[in-house]
Image: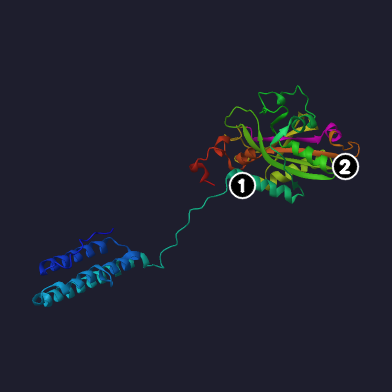
Amino acid sequence: MRIALPTPTMNTMNIEEFSKKLSEILSAAEKEFRLADSSHLAVVRAKFLGRKGELAKVMRALGSLPADVKPEAGKLANNTKQKLEKIFAQFEPQKISVHKKFDPTLPGRKPAIGGIHPLEWTLRKMVDIFYGMGFSVASGPEIETEYYNFDALNTPEDHPARDIQDTFYLQKPGYLLRTQTSPVQIRVMESQKPPVRIIAPGRCYRRDAIDATHYYTFTQVEGLYVDKDVTLADLKGVLTAFAKQFIGKNVRVRFRPHFFPFTEPSVEYDFSCPVCDGKGCRVCKGTGWLEISGAGMVDPEVFKTVGYNPDEVQGYAFGMGVERIAMVKFGIDDIRLLYENDLAFLEQF
């Protein structure tokens, strides 16, 4: 805050005006010193006590005063200077001590930092486990063609998954938001010869009604292994090893017969519920098991599409939703919690 002072008229100033002007300087100086912080104290002091400060301006008016009052005026000016210096000396230590005082016995301030989202943590953990098994990571576009998303995966044109009620089709004919990361498997097999051992993590999209277990977008990790003499037992071993590393050594895995257009034979697999240890609870709906996803041996028709000879190579493929795995790991019973950015929920991780 800067306080404006009346400019003295040097040629006409008398002793009364001189005294009044000194009083105004004192009053203004005290107000500015009280309002100034430590970084501005030097500026305020120079304003009143500097060579071109307010006191110096008034001192220059001494020559215009009558000779008989000059001694009194000089005494008033000196007294004012002393009072100004006393004011400055009084306030400066107080101001500076507020900002520079340091107590080494106080605990340090803990910075506010964010954490890894449970979905991202789960994805990283899954990738690390499969990477340790020898799988490399592959990726592909989220905007796909019908050929890679359906045709090359042996999905017939009348399959329900191709209905507009289930898939996000784009205005450009033949293009859609991928419903799975399986198209990455086709693109990789087109570009390299066996052996192939990859996982394909990524975002997928389906026109599902949103509820506690479904969302219109989700993250998936698909796996593919193609080589000679690959069997269903290899697939079961990999998925069981993954479950024990991710969930815990006591987890159990069960496989149930199923059908998928791009695998034959096909299975669905479940993990025993880690919350209740398979005894039955709210998370597993009393069954003791949590459904994970599907898997199976790659259908020979898929191999023919990418130019592999199904008489020479075999392979297995599997897929699992990252959200489902995260819900199993952390005991989350509503998938929507993973997308609502509720701090009360996220701060638990």
Q: Residue at x 22, y 72 (%)?
A: 86
Mark nearest the camera among 2 and 1 is 1
Give the secondary structure at mark 2. Answer: loop
Checking the image for residue 136, the label placed there is none
Queried whether the magenta region covers residue 167, the answer comes back as no
Mark 2 crowdedness (10 Å alpha carbons): few <14, some 14-19, many ≥20: few
Q: State the residue lying farthest toward the right.
A: 311
Queried whether the magenta region covers residue 303, the answer comes back as yes
Residue 180 spot, x, y in % from top left: 70, 34
Closest to the observer: 6 or 276?
6
Residue 6 spot, x, y in % from top left: 20, 61
Q: Which residues are magenta?
A: 287-304
- Give the residue type at disc 1: Trp
- Give the residue type at disc 2: Asp
Closest to the observer: 100 or 265?
100
Give the secondary structure at mark 1. Answer: helix
Specify the quadrant that holds the N terminus: bottom left
Q: Residue at x 16, y 65 (%)?
A: 21
Q: Examine the image and state in which quarter residue 106 appears.
A: bottom left
Give left or right: position of 249 versus 155: left
Residue 345, compared with residue 166, is above or below; it is below
Q: Examine the image and state in which quarter residue 259 appears.
A: top right
- Per the image, the residue denoted by label 1 is 121
Give left or right: position of 126 versus 79: right
Q: Residue at x 84, y 33 (%)?
A: 305
- Per the image, the residue denoted by label 2 is 229
